[in-house]
Amino acid sequence: MSTTVPSVTLNNGVRMPQLGFGVFQVPDQETAAAVTTALEAGYRSIDTAAIYGNERGVGQALAASGLPREELFVTTKLWNADQGYDATLRAFDDSLDRLGLEQVDLYLIHWPAPGRDRYLDSWRAIERLAAEGRIRAAGVSNFQPAHLTRLLEHSALVPAVNQIELHPALQQAELRAFHAAHGIATEAWSPLAQGAVLDDPAITAIAERTGRSAAQVVLRWHLQLGNLVIPKSVTPARIRQNLDVLDFALTDEELAAIAATDRGLRTGPHPDELD
Ligand code: NDP
C-alpha cells in the first residue's frame, strides 16, 4: 500500500495533506488510541474542534508519537459560543493548551452562526493570530457564499479553506465554484455521509469493478475532485483502509456516475440555521 499522501498548497503557500483523519464524536478517552492508530497507519493531518471535547486526546497521541512537529498538520475550530474578538483569542489559547501545542496549522471558524453576527469580529482575531505566527493558515467552516462574500468585503485575508459537508449525496457545486474563483480550498466533512452513501448502487458497482470497498471508492472520488478530505473511524482496519486509496483511479465514466448521485442530502444542520 502506498502511503504518500499528496498535499494541497493553500493560498498562503502552506502545504496541507489532502487526506487526513477526523475525530468528531470520538470520546476524549478513546481519541488518543484512534489518533495513534491513524498516525501509525501514515496519516499526518488530524481534524478536531473545541466542541468535540477531545483536543486533549489528540494532543496526547501527537506527543506520544514522537513525530517531529513539522511533519504533523493539526486543525482545530472555534466554537460558536466563543465568537467575538476577545472571546476568540481566549478560546484559541484554551485549544492550544489542551492540544499541548504552540501553534496550530489550520484554525477554522466552525460555523458562521449568522444569528450571533460575530464572525467578522472572530475573523479579525484570527487575522491577529495569523500575523503573530500562532496559526499557519486561517479558514472557515460551513460558510455559505453570502457569508464568504461578506468576509471578503471586510478583510484582505482570504480564508485558506472552507470545510463543508460534502459527499456524493451533497456535492456542493455552487460552493466549489465559489471557492475555485477565490482561491479557497474545499475541505469535505462527513466525506462518507457518515455511511449513508456506502450502499448506493452506483458506488457499489464501482467497488466491485475496482475490488475496493465503497468507502475507498468515495474517498478516491474526493481526491480526484481535488477536495481535502478527513474521514473518521475508530475501527483500526477502517482507519488503515481509508488511507489505502492512493494507488487506483476512477475513470471519467465512473466519476460521471457518482456525479449523478447528488440528492441534496444533509447529514448535519444547514449553515444558515445553526447559531
Ligand atoms: P464520515 O463521513 O467520516 O463517516 C464516519 C462514519 O463512517 C463512522 O460511523 C465510521 O464508523 C464509518 N466508516 C468510516 N470508515 C469506514 C469504512 N471504510 N467502511 C465503512 N464505514 C466506515 O463522518 P464524520 O461526520 O465523522 O466526518 C468526518 C470528519 O469531518 C469528522 O470526524 C470531523 O473531523 C469533520 N466534521 C466537521 C464538521 C464541521 O462542522 N466542520 C461536521 C462534521 C464532521 P466507525 O468509526 O465505527 O469505524
Image (cartoon, rainbow, N blue to C red):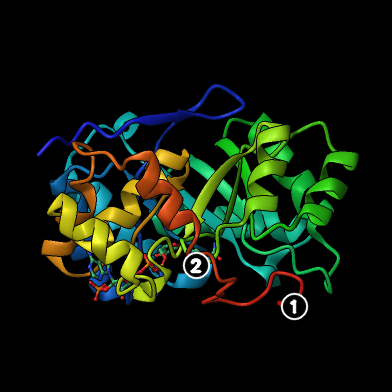
Percent position of residue 23, x then y:
36, 65
Type of amino acid at the residue the image marks with label 1? Glu
Residue 80 higher or lower than 150, as above or below: below
Seen as rendered, the residue at the extreme right is: 153
Residue under the image location 18 percent in, 46 percent down: 244
Could you say which is closer to the camera, residue 199 or residue 98? Answer: 199
* Distance in Å between CA atoms under marks 1 and 2: 20 Å
- As helix, strand or loop, the secondary structure at mark 2 comes to loop
Find disc 2 in the rendering and name its residue: 169
The residue shown at (38%, 45%) is 253
* Mark 1, secondary structure of its residue: loop
Q: Nearer the viewer, residue 30 or 218?
A: 218
Q: How many marks?
A: 2
119 to the left or right of 13: right
x, y percent for residue 8: 45, 31
Left or right of residue 249: residue 86: right
Quadrant for ligand 1 reads bottom left
Q: Residue furthest front?
A: 253
Residue at (13% x, 64% y) in the render: 236
Percent of width and height locating residue 97: 46, 55
Please indicate, yes or no, whether residue 256 appears anywhere in the rendered image: yes
Q: Amino acid at mark 2?
A: Ala
Mark 1, residue position: 273
